[in-house]
Image (tube, rainbow, N blue to C red):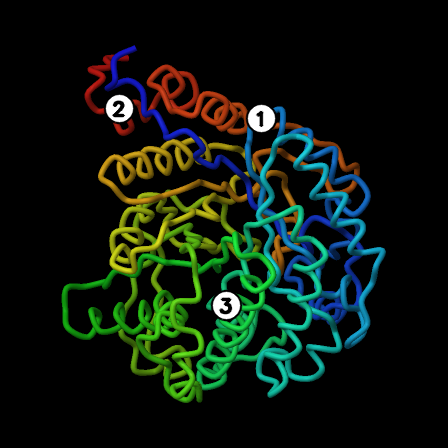
Amino acid sequence: MPVSERLQFPSGFLWGVSTSAYQVEGNSINTNWYEFEKAGGIKTGDRSGIACNWWNRAEDDFDIAQTMGLNSLRLSVSWARIEPEEGIFNAIAIQRYRRMLNELLARNIRPVVCLHHFTHPLWFEQKGAFLSPQCVGDFTRFVKFTVAELGDLCSDWITINEPNVYGVEGYIDGNHPPARKGQILEYFKLLGNMALCHGSAYHIIHGLQKEARVGFANHFIIFTEAHHEIFDRLAARIASDSFNNAFINMISGKRALPFSNIRSRLSEINNTWDFIGVNIYGGVDVAFDITRPETGFVRRLNPRNGRTGDLDEAGNPMFGEIYPQGIEIVVKKLAHHQKPFIILENGVPDREDRLRPWVIATAVKTIHKLIQSGYPVLGYFHWTLIDNFEWAHGYYMKFGLVEMDPVTQERRPRLSAGFYSEIAHNNCLTLDMVRRYVPEYVNDIFPDSADER
């Protein structure tokens, strides 16, 4: 096969999927999210219930991942299970997580463990969570115990998933617990405290595991000015600085957010990352809006084209325009930090699987181009393996390579699962694969193929 018809990846490239504990384990009581559910916070009225029943049957889905040829899987551990009461740890929970990690390793699947993915114990929430003066001590106590117990089975750690999303959804938009709105100053303070938690956790982990690879997962949105005028350009810059860049600026020692109270402590957290974890789904147009001080005077607009994925239960796109090409923008923008990249989340809500194969093909092509240009991208993790409980959207939004019925628990691989499986098994993307799975986009992915079909 000519080189122009095969995008070959380096040996050892990570082909994975990402998951999170609350969305798949089931019966995750005693958490901030469980209380949010009980209070009616889920827009569909759904309750997570047994979710994907991973607490009892995760190994069945690990079999699916193994069959697909995946060599890595990102999962999170539940702080609420491990430390259900402050300072009291649950040996049964740790043993279950040890079994999960052992089962992944037995299938030659490398685990990547996230320590905080939106949920935490109710006692931590009642103290103020990451706004509490004790948050750094509380978080690092949990991290030290967990890594000491699981570290012989895992050396890749994500301290915190999407601190920017946690802050925006919980304190500005009010869609996640604690369901506050317009508290932009609290958002700044929160991110500063989460940066301190991350930095402390980084040092704790490396103290326990010198060979560990420790990072974080940051959500990136490609913000574009709605009109070529100065105020909309300003809106795009405000949005990007306060959302995309804020956490990275702090842990790289560059600058602290206003009112975050950590300016004098930046040296403690400077350079506390071994890789940049990129979560990216979409891009949005933004406009300056003087009537919206609670969002930094920024207004998001509806996308201009139809690549939105499924609309949510209110008829709105979750991520604006689905934009896997944005991986290139993010990697090139952050390359000056001289850290390797792992694409830790990328996907689309797509129950009919109409757009997901294109997302996969475009993301893979984009990453291959970056690697060929010398950018160190170590892996791609699709969100997600199996349909799950999609936070405030309940079971309405479908992100899985594998379809799941939350009532019957029946699994059925979608077409995109077969596509991604072929890529992972062969460590490459070929013209033949694209012709079979996304024939309408052959010329987008392989423009030199002279395909006349």
> Which residue position holds label 1?
68
Out of 35 and 258, give the one closest to the viewer. Answer: 258
Residue occupying the point 73% across, 70% down: 121
Q: Earlier in the sequence, mark 3 or mark 1?
A: 1
Quadrant in which the C terminus is drawn: top left
The image shows residue 336 at horizontal and vertical percentages of: 25, 58
The image shows residue 333 at horizontal and vertical percentages of: 25, 57
Q: Earlier in the sequence, mark 3 or mark 2?
A: 3
The mark found on residue 450 in the picture is none
Callout 1 secondary element: loop
> Which residue position holds label 3?
163
Question: In 3D space, how far apart are the residues under numbered discs 3 and 1 (Cα atoms)?
Answer: 31 Å
Out of 242 and 201, give the one closest to the viewer. Answer: 201
> Which residue position holds label 2?
446
Question: In 3D space, how far apart are the residues under numbered discs 3 and 2 (Cα atoms)?
Answer: 37 Å
Residue occupying the point 43% across, 40% down: 379
The type of residue carrying mark 2 is Phe
Which mark lies nearer to you, 3 or 2?
3
The type of residue carrying mark 3 is Pro
Q: Earlier in the sequence, mark 2 or mark 1?
A: 1
User: Number of callouts in the render?
Assistant: 3
Callout 3 secondary element: helix
Quadrant housing residue 243: bottom left
Vertical order, 419 against 305 (above or below): above
Out of 425 and 376, give the one closest to the viewer. Answer: 376
Callout 2 secondary element: loop
The image shows residue 302 at horizontal and vertical percentages of: 36, 57
Vertical order, 334 against 397 (above or below): below
Residue occupying the point 80% across, 63% down: 29
Question: In 3D space, how far apart are the residues under numbered discs 2 and 1 (Cα atoms)?
Answer: 24 Å
Quadrant housing residue 292: bottom left
The type of residue carrying mark 1 is Met
